[in-house]
């Protein structure tokens, strides 16, 4: 039996936890582009590209220490570490080569010379025990190189975390992404010990906040713990449960504010209003708590925009058809709770949720919950594809597979503010909306919410 190093689990918790404060002085970054091609410079976690339009552009950065990225027009990128008060000069030569000089020159040279991108030899099967061991070994080798390079101690501690979070992001997010884009019915194979690291994973070092996509990694880790039963799934107060999984007070504060923002992005408006009072006392860091007012304003705007699908609103009646053309009227389903999954065949995330939808349907068979898989495929080609898919790989018994005439152009979707899928709605026994944006079937909190609702009667 091979020994699992569990680097990601153990070392994250044991790196130096005391972080010196940086001054508020801004950093100055000069970008000189001699190559003539378009180049972009922005924080590594940014989704939008910020083009550097002049050959000598001075950019002022006011954030705490952070990783930035210079991106060439051909897609090549060059990571750059920036600290407050520092001066950095980035030169892109005629040949496309990048030179970084200035305050953090030694550190940036190390990043360029020793990149870690979680790449393994082709002979190693992704997400196997060998895949885990190889990456953990590579991270330990990089630790030794960092220690031997005489780098700034703060950067050294931060960059060790950076490498670990790069691995965690792939270990957690890579599997989730593979499940979305897997061929129909094909499982993503992982090693038996793949998630063992979650038993000891902690978030105790506030340097985590400097890592690009730190929130995505922490949130995915906690959600995975939840789905595997390591922490309870409680729909009414999951934010408090999540908060208890984070040791560091500052990290916890920023995590909760980012979680509130994600809740609004997902349109979980009931979660925001219900759980903010409960977690507000846990958001103790001033930098995090300052964002709450902005989020409350966003919540108010979204609530006004979604007034027509608010909880308690009567669900409109509508007609839908199964693969044989049989018509159903939604009004006929009153007397039971109803889960509606709006989807279409070309949506990979929709298809990824289908096995979970079937599992939840099986779990509530005979408990007064109806499950409707409602395709919005329209046009002869897509409609035929839906019928073929449903005949070859039908849903589990208890799931009604139907199609909505006119799909995205139907009056129903306009009335329900449905502009994208997958979209899950939960309706009560009287035909009133409980959640216009319910949790996805893969989220154990949906099952827990249904258990609470069905237990009341």
Image (tube, rainbow, N blue to C red):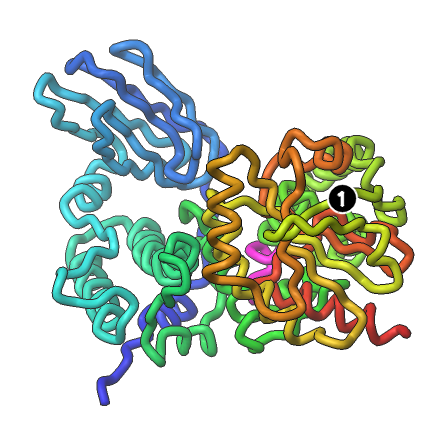
Q: Please identify the quarter of the rendering in which residue 442 is found.
A: bottom right
Q: Is residue 423 visible?
A: yes
Circle 1 is placed at which residue position?
Answer: 319
Query: Which quadrant of the figure contains the N terminus?
Result: bottom left
Q: Is residue 35 above or below residue 320?
A: above
Label 1: element kind: strand
Judging depth in this view, the residue of 262 and 307 nearest the camera is 307
Residue in the image at 71% along x and 41% along y = 292
Whether the magenta-drawn stretch holds residue 118 is answered as no
Residue at the bottom extreme?
Answer: 1
Q: Please identify the quarter of the rendering in which residue 236 is found.
A: bottom right
User: Magenta segment, which residues?
Assistant: 247-253
Asked if residue 237 lies left or right of residue 232, the reply is: right
Judging depth in this view, the residue of 102 and 224 nearest the camera is 224
Residue at the top extreme?
Answer: 54
Asked if residue 425 lies left or right of residue 228, the reply is: right
Q: Position of residue 316 (x, y in %)?
A: 84, 42
Residue in the image at 24% along x and 23% along y = 73
Q: Position of residue 444 (x, y in %)?
A: 62, 67
Asked if residue 125 lies left or right of residue 437, the reply is: left
Q: Is residue 89 above or below residue 351?
A: above
Q: Position of residue 68 (x, y in %)?
A: 35, 35
Residue in the image at 67% along x and 68% along y = 398
């Amino acid at each position: 039996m091979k020994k699992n190093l569990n680097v990601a689990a153990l070392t994250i918790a044991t790196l130096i936890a005391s972080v010196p404060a940086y001054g508020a002085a801004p950093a100055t970054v000069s970008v000189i582009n001699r190559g003539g091609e378009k180049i972009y410079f922005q924080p590594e976690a940014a989704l939008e590209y910020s083009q550097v339009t002049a050959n000598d552009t001075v950019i002022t950065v006011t954030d705490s220490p952070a990783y930035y990225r210079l991106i060439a027009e051909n897609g090549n990128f060059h990571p750059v570490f920036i600290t407050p008060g520092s001066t950095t000069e980035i030169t892109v030569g005629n040949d496309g080569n990048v030179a970084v000089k200035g305050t953090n020159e030694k550190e940036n040279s190390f990043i360029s010379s020793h990149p870690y991108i979680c790449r393994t030899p082709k002979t190693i099967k992704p997400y196997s025990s060998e895949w885990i061991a190889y990456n953990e070994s590579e991270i330990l080798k990089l630790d030794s190189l960092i220690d031997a390079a005489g780098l700034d101690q703060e950067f050294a501690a931060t960059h060790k975390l950076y490498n670990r979070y790069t691995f965690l992001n792939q270990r957690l997010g890579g599997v989730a992404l593979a499940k979305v884009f897997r061929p129909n019915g094909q499982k993503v194979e992982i090693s038996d010990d793949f998630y063992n690291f979650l038993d000891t994973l902690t978030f105790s070092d506030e340097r985590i906040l400097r890592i690009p996509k730190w929130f995505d990694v922490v949130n995915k880790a906690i959600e995975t713990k939840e789905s595997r039963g390591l922490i309870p799934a409680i729909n009414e107060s999951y934010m408090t449960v999540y908060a208890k999984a984070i040791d560091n007070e500052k990290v916890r504060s920023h995590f909760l504010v980012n979680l509130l923002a994600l809740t609004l992005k997902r349109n979980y408006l009931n979660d925001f209003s219900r759980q903010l009072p409960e977690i507000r006392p846990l958001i103790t860091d001033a930098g995090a708590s300052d964002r709450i007012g902005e989020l409350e304003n966003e919540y108010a705007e979204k609530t006004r925009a979604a007034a027509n699908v608010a909880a308690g609103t009567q669900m409109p009646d509508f007609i839908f058809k199964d693969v044989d053309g049989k018509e159903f009227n939604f009004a006929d389903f009153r007397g039971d709770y109803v889960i509606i999954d709006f989807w279409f065949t070309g949506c990979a995330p929709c298809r990824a949720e289908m096995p979970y939808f079937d599992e939840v349907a099986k779990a509530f068979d005979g408990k007064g919950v109806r499950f409707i898989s409602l395709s919005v495929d329209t046009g002869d080609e897509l409609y035929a594809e839906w019928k073929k898919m449903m005949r070859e790989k039908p849903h589990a018994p208890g799931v009604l597979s139907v199609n909505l005439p006119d799909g995205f152009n139907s009056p129903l979707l306009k009335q329900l503010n449905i502009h994208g899928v997958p979209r899950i709605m939960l309706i009560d026994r009287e035909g009133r909306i409980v959640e216009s944006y319910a949790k996805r079937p893969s989220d154990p909190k949906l099952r827990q919410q249904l258990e609470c609702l069905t237990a009341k009667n």
